[in-house]
Amino acid sequence: MNPELINYFTENTEYEFKLTVNNKTKTSVEELSDLESRTFPVKDCWEFIGFADGAYLAASQKNHIPELDEMGSEYNYLVNEMLDDQVLRRMNILLGENNTKVHYIYSELRKISRQINNLENDFKILIKPGSEDIEQYRTESGDLVFTQKAAEWTLIGVDNSDVDLMTSEDFSTSALFVRKYKDGFSLGANVDIPFDSQDLDQFYHNNSFDLPISVEYVILASEENH
């Protein structure tokens, strides 16, 4: 792995880099360890994968400064839009397709919850699913007292479900993946160090990762929008 990227990553995060040798095969294994002394291969470090993807984007910017200046705020908008899709693609490889589907479902339900909360706030009402006995909220004085809280959703699998809810990770696990990946991506997207992008390409190839978004993709999306 590229030493400049590894050094920059470990200098700006909680991770330490370790190079261990497999005594049987006599091959070296590049690993990262966190503050809790958990050690794992570089390819399994969610934050580093995000960092590598962000650095890939940053490296591709240098040849397109005039176009980026012309795009203005549209550039960041398109990057953020593409990033959401890229997070799911990386999650699909690192957490599995089933967990990716469950995460997507809960993410969409959270959007619905926010829409419901916005309606409640806009019209100063509470919205409850199905029929509701209003009298249970009435106090002795006759007033109605409600407490607003986020909607709760329960996923129930049936025989022909497209997801296996019994074996999927808790939503908090995939949410942690998203946070760590995006933290790493933000760090990498703002990196300005010399490195060989071909080495990064090889890292993706060796670990069966598809190439991440680059400025070329963003510019192409902008042209398609117009």
Image (spheres, rainbow, N blue to C red):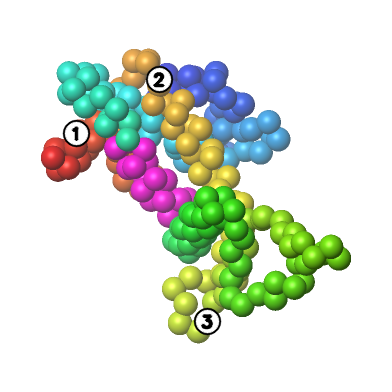
**Residue most toward the top?**
193
The span from disc 2 to disc 3 (Cα, nearest Å) is: 47 Å
Q: Determine which residue is flagged by label 1.
A: 219
Mark 3 and 1 residues: CB-CB less than 8 Å, in contact? no
Position of 132 compared to 77: left or right?
right
Is 224 placed left or right of 200 in the picture? Answer: left
* Element at label 1: helix
The Cα atoms of the two marked residues, 1 and 2, are separated by 20 Å
Tell me if residue 74 comes above or below residue 115 in the rendering: above
Residue in the picture at 50% in, 84% down: 159
| Callout 3: SS | loop
Q: Is residue 114 above or below residue 199?
A: below
The quadrant where residue 139 appears: bottom right
Q: Secondary structure at mark 2?
A: loop
Q: Which residue is mark 2?
A: 191
How many tags in the picture? 3
Q: Which residues are magenta?
A: 78-95
Residue 49 in view of the camera: yes
x and y, in percent, of residue 149 in the image: 66, 55
Q: Which residue is mark 3?
A: 158
> Which circle, 1 or 2, is nearer the viewer?
1
User: Mark 2 or mark 3, which has the lower sequence index?
Assistant: 3
Residue at left offset 41%, top offset 51%: 88
Q: Earlier in the sequence, mark 1 or mark 2?
A: 2
Label 3 and label 1: CA atoms lie apart by: 43 Å
